[in-house]
Image (cartoon, helix red, strand yellow):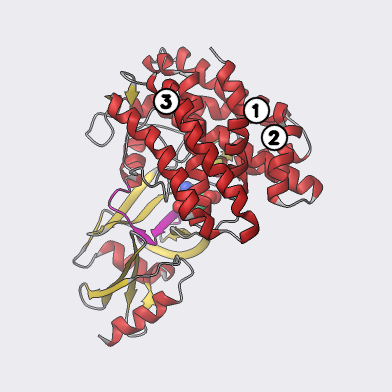
Amino acid sequence: MELCEAAKELADRQPWKLNCENFRADCRQLDGKWYLFSEIGCGETLVALVNGPKGEIVDSNPVLLSALLSSPPQGLTSTCSNLRISSVRPISSSQRATIYEALSQDGNRFLVKVMRRADRDNVEHMVLRYLTDAGFTHAPRYVCHAELDLGPFILVSEYVEGEPAASIYVAESSGHETVRVEQLGSLVGKAVAELHQTLYACNEDWCRPEPITEDDVNRWISRLSWRSRWLRTQGTELVPRYERPLVLEAADALEELAGYALESAMLQVGRYKMRTHGDLHLYQIILVGNNIMITDFEGEPYRFPALKVEKEHLMRDLAALARSIDYAAAMGIQIRYGTSLGDASVISSRELATWEVKAFKSIFDSYATRLREMDSPLASELLPRALGFWIIERASYEAVYELTAHTGYHDIPLNAIIRMIDGNDPLLNYVSRLR
Ligand SMILES: Nc1ncnc2c1ncn2[C@@H]1O[C@H](COP(=O)(O)OP(=O)(O)O)[C@@H](O)[C@H]1O
Ligand SMILES: [Mg+2]
């Protein structure tokens, strides 16, 4: 019990807690000195595995991490029995996961992702293992993973060293340049086409492509009105008073967009829903030499009312990329003029409208070309109007996500949604002209 108290105190100091009113905390002993601390609140389960009388968090200690992975206590299953870790170095820490670079005793370098939120819907290890087995070269190789009964907990994969594509897009947008972005775009489009083609061939329940029904589309459309209501009720509570009119305006625009988008969205009926990347933004894409590496297959956090494991049409990934280009444009303008992100996200859609379109076109064109080159049946899934629907849907997700996670980026999607209803969004206009 004492140990659990220590664990609770430790967990209370973690920065990854959200502001939930009601938490239910729990601590249980696994085997020996392993304790699993969990806290349930806001529909999420925070987890920390602790060891020893002082309640030391396991994952930042190479000795404990190795012991945990090679002889897992009851309650944890691990496929990492052969891995002997000699050092770990934290490289990123988000609300969802802490990421470490680890060296093994035989001198190999790995990425160790330790989840802060246990989530049974997280299929990242399955996707990565499938892609590795299928010989896919644009994602880090799966090494092993460990799972709690609450959900996947640790994922070990190949460490890749490179530059996030997003940094290049932001640098180019701040300088109004397109040369590198267009080169990079064609690599990204090709890699995403190959990713989709590989996922399309996946033949298990969790990944097998299935025909899209009218019910699917109605459910997808209803996300827009659900999120519009969320913005109006909860979203307005999460911003300072002066920003409430912006949130309300976006909420109204989104409700209206739901009506307009229905017809385009319905064009997907009878097409494929399948496993996609699910959260394909430019910070998840790493340029390694001349190779594109796609990371983080966990899907979107806070995508309510949608389910994480839901299969969707593959235009969804292209929509996420399109929106990510808009983020990069706003960040570039912020750097160029030193304005607030809110102002930058308004200026960028005017000043960088052509830039955004060029940046996206290079991805879309090379994506389409690669699908055709591969003689992929997915070439007939290139549905620009459905892409338009997913651009709206992705922006609605972003608005809810940025507010929920308190990232400070909410102005970007809110302003985009308002532009969309005014007919002024460069990317939505571009895809609506595509045939
Ligand atoms: N295999 C990898 N090798 C090296 N760095 C990686 C790898 N995967 C992810 N990263 C880096 O760690 C960061 C966070 O990883 P990610 O899987 O996206 O977790 P999160 O859920 O925190 O977003 C990424 O932005 C990327 O820069
Ligand atoms: Mg990520």
Q: Is residue 116 inside the magenta stretch?
A: yes
Between marks 2 and 1, how big is the CA–CA gap?
7 Å
Residue ID for mark 3? 262
Q: Where residue 349 is drawn, which disc sits there?
A: 2
The kind of secondary structure element at disc 1 is helix
Q: Residue 292: name its quadrant.
A: top right
On screen, residue 322 versus residue 181, left or right, reads: left
Which residue is painted at 29% across and 81% down in the image?
Answer: 4
Q: Which residues are magenta?
A: 107-122
| Badge 2 amino acid | Ser
Q: Earlier in the sequence, mark 3 or mark 1?
A: 3
| Badge 3 amino acid | Leu
Q: Residues within 10 Å of mark 2 (few under 14, many from 20)?
A: many
Q: Residue 9: name its quadrant.
A: bottom left
Q: Residues within 10 Å of mark 3 (few under 14, many from 20)?
A: some
Camera-nearest label, 3 or 1: 3
